[in-house]
Each structure stands twice: as C-alpha cells, then as structure tokens.
Amino acid sequence: MQSSWLHILWIGLEVTLRLSLYTIVFSIVVAAAFAVASISQRRLVRWTVRFVVDLLRSIPILALLIFVYYGLGKYIASWNIDPFWMAVGALTLGEAAFLSEVFRAGLEAVPRAQWEAATSLGFRRSSALGRIIAPQAVLPSIPGVVNMSIFTFKDSSLASVIAVPEVTQVANQLVSETFKPLQVYLLLAGFYLVVILPFTALAGVAERAVTRYYGLRVDKTSVARN
Amino acid sequence: MSDARTVEAGSPGMSVTRPGAALLEVQGLEKAFGPTRVLEGIDFHLAEGEKVCVVGPSGSGKTTLIRCFNLLIEPTRGKLFFRGDLVGDWPERPATINLRQYRRRIGMVFQHFELFPHLTAIDNITLAPRRILGRSRAEARATAEELLQRIGLAHVAKAHPHRLSGGQKQRIAIARALAMSPELILFDEPTSALDPEMVGEVLRLMADLAREGTTMVIVTHELGFARQVADRLVVMEAGRIVEQGPTAKMFEAPELQRTREILQLEASWGYQL
C-alpha cells in the first residue's frame, strides 16, 4: 500500500519539478528584462515597468492562476493550452516580479563610478551594462534567486487548483481515495522537504564559489606585493 | 608604448589640431547642481603635450572641472573645444558630436581606481580596446602585456583586482587608460586613496608618462609632484580659478596673496618624489 502511494506521489513530484524548473528559468529571463527596463534612462519605460512589477507583486499567485485559467481560459480555449503551461505562465509572472527587484537592487548596488569608468572608456550604456555592470550584480543576486526558486517550488502547489497533476493535486486525489489524510499529507510534506533541504545547502556552496571567482570579498592577507 | 600611442590615435581624421588651436579649451564654463554653483566662469586651455596640475581645497570644483572635460558631467553653460572643434556650447548647443567617440580619446584615472572587479588585471586593460576599438584578442593582449611589462606588473596579469595593492590597482588603471591610446589623460586625485607607502610608485609612473610627452591634467594635493612635473598650475577655490600660470612662477611669485595661502595650505601635506 505504502509503496504504491510513493509511486503515485513520485509521478506528481515529477510534474512539480518540471513546473518549478520551467518557472525558475523563465522567471530569471523575465526578471532580468524587467530589471534592465526598470533602470532605463527613459522615464516612460521605467515607470511602465515599475508599475507592472508593483501590480504583479500585489496580486496573490493563487489569484493569478485563477485569473489565467478561469478568467482568460474562455477566450483562449481554442488555443488548447495545457493547464501546465498556464501555470508556468502565471507562476512566472508572479515570481519574476519579485526577482526583478532582486536584480534591480543588484544592478543599483554597483557603484556609479563603475558606470563612469565604462563611459570614460567609450562604452555605450548597453554594453557597459552587459560587460561591466551586470556581471557585478550576479553574485549579490544569487541568494535572491535561491529564495525565489524555493518559493516557486512551494508555490507550484497552487497549480493544483487548476488541475495540473503536480504532487499536491495528486496527494489530494490520493486522500479522497484512501481517506487517510494525515499519512498522505505527511508524506507530501516529506517530499517537499527532501527537495528543498539539499537545494538550500547547494545554494550556499554555489554562493561561496562565485564569491571566490569574482573575489569581491577583500582578503587583506593575500595582497600581492611587488 | 609611447609609439603605440601616436601610431594608434583613435580616429586619424579628427586628431589633427587646427593651427593655433589648443588641444582642449573651455570658455566661460559653468556648472550648477540645482541652485548650487560648483563652477563659475572657468576659462582654460591646454596645449598638446602640456602637463597641468589643478590644485585647491576640497570642494573647490577641481573634480567637477575635469569631469566636464570628458563630459562625464555636462556643463550648464560655456563652450568646450577639442583640437579647435566645438564639442558643445551650453545651453544652446549641448554636445553636438558623438560623445562616445569623443570620450574614448580622453583617458581617465579615478581616485578609487574603478577597476572592473570581475575581470583580471589584463582583461581590465584589454576590454575597451577589444570592445570599443575592435582590436582582436591577440592584438589587445600583446599591447596589454607590453604595458604591464613596462609598469612592472606583468606578474599580476591574471590576478583579480582584489588581490592587488592600492598602488598596483592604480597603475593597472593607468595602463587601462593608456591602452586606448588617449590624446589626453585626466587624473582625478590619483593618489588620494592610497596608503602613503604606495603613493610613490604611482607618482613615479605618472612622472614617466609626463617625460614621454603625454598630455595630462592632474587634480592633486601632491604639490611636490606638481612642482616637478607640471608645466602649469591651476589654483581653484569655490568653483573659480583663482590664478593659473607656469608652475615655477606660481610657487615663487604668484600674482595673488590668496594663491600663496592656498598653496601653503596644500603644502602642509604632500609627498616628495
């Protein structure tokens, strides 16, 4: 009995992982675009993006999901979009709005003099951003990306309300068949835990590695002398 | 390296100075941040090969002035000429030329070095020649290695800036500016952020460049250096040029008592080459 539960939940977990992975990747791309636009020199671009980001941040992800599935569903029914991709879309919008603030903070934390150094060498704004400013924003953004990834993984459970067969939805079904909510949901919690715990540990390792690579932490003892 | 600079001058068509024209000239330059006037009525010219030191108390507008030269700061009023060509006439005709092409002809060295922390020393030097001048990787590397060799830092080519001492960082920053073969280099208090024992190595490199005929404008508090290296001294206070003239005269027989006072004040700290 128990082993078939595990098997059923495992299938759900695969969907959860796929859902999370797509959302994380798309969120990073969308958030990067939002962040770049939100520091644009064009006021209209800046204001528009900041408005959109604030709007998305103030809508619960559950509401976004319901809006996309039930609100838009009727009008895009002919496109035959799988609820899975609707969930990816709604989750991406919700998570990217938060992540874009992380990226923006990272970009704005690069000293203004770095822009000036780039400008004085003849860089245009876009290449200064790409070659000089953005690379320096990567390291400080990593904890934010990790956080967002964990939230995404947990928030993906919300997709159960729009019939995406991810692990929480599968667990719900299992409960309605077995009438053993405590056991099933404890198992479900275990699934989430097992994925998230190593991920946070891995994140710490990645952060230290990037720190070493960029060497942004000043190490007074290893200053080279002539 | 000095021939690299003359041979590879940015855009040949533009680098011919009009007869009788200064390399760089400003007339009636003014800069205001809101109601605060930081620069007022600045007239200044710079001949090719000239070394000028700008001195004055903190907040006198020295840094703002040289930032107006490469338009990191846009003047509020006044005219700017480069090799006799009008760069801009504010407020009516603000910067009519291609600013990027203009800026890359002028090197800049910052107080806090502003090396790119994610790049190694050599990549700091090659980035702009590759991306801005379109040099090949090999070509840019060869030039950079030559530069590193000559500033005595070949051994740190692959180190990231955080591994370097302040003096090494500033010398790399100077090499980064030189790699663009600038027609003029601006120095914004290049030794002010350095530990005392590292000031000498940077000043010596700058003195070397001066000897080779590099055109330089140096904002500094190092009067000993200014006295030895500068052709001309500009003394500023409260956003105005108090007095400017040949270095020796400025030190020995300035026109104004105020100049003497400022120089005396500035001389109370300083470094002997």
Image (cartoon, coloured by chain):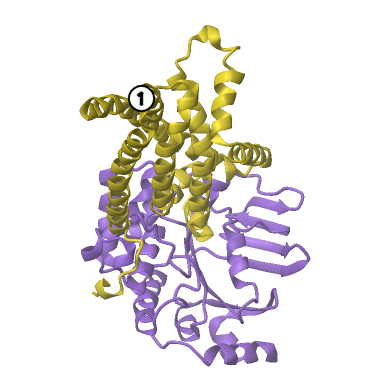
Nearer to me, A168 or B181: A168
Name the quadrant of the C terminus of chain A: bottom left
Q: Is residue B213 left or right of residue B55?
A: left
Residue B39 at x, y = what percent?
A: 70, 69
Amino acid bearing label 1: Leu
Q: Quadrant of residue A40?
A: top right
Taking the spot 48% from the left edge, 70% from the top edge, the residue there is: B111
Tell me, yes or no, if residue B14 can be seen here: no
Image position of A109 with respect to A29: above or below: below
Colour chain B appears in: purple
Residue A89 at x, y = what percent?
A: 49, 26
Colour chain A appears in: yellow
**Chain for numbered disc 1:** A
Image position of B86 with respect to B204: above or below: above
Secondary-structure class at tag 1: helix
Nearer to me, B109 or A221: A221
Name the quadrant of the N terminus of chain A: top left
Residue B188 at x, y = what percent?
A: 51, 69
Tell me, yes or no, if residue A29 can be seen here: yes
Q: Quadrant of residue B245?
A: bottom right
Image position of A70 with respect to A199: above or below: above
Taking the spot 59% from the left edge, 91% from the top edge, the residue there is: B265
Residue B176 at x, y = what percent?
A: 38, 58
Image position of B107 with respect to B164: above or below: above
Residue receiving disc 1? A174
Residue that sits furthest to the top in the current view = A78
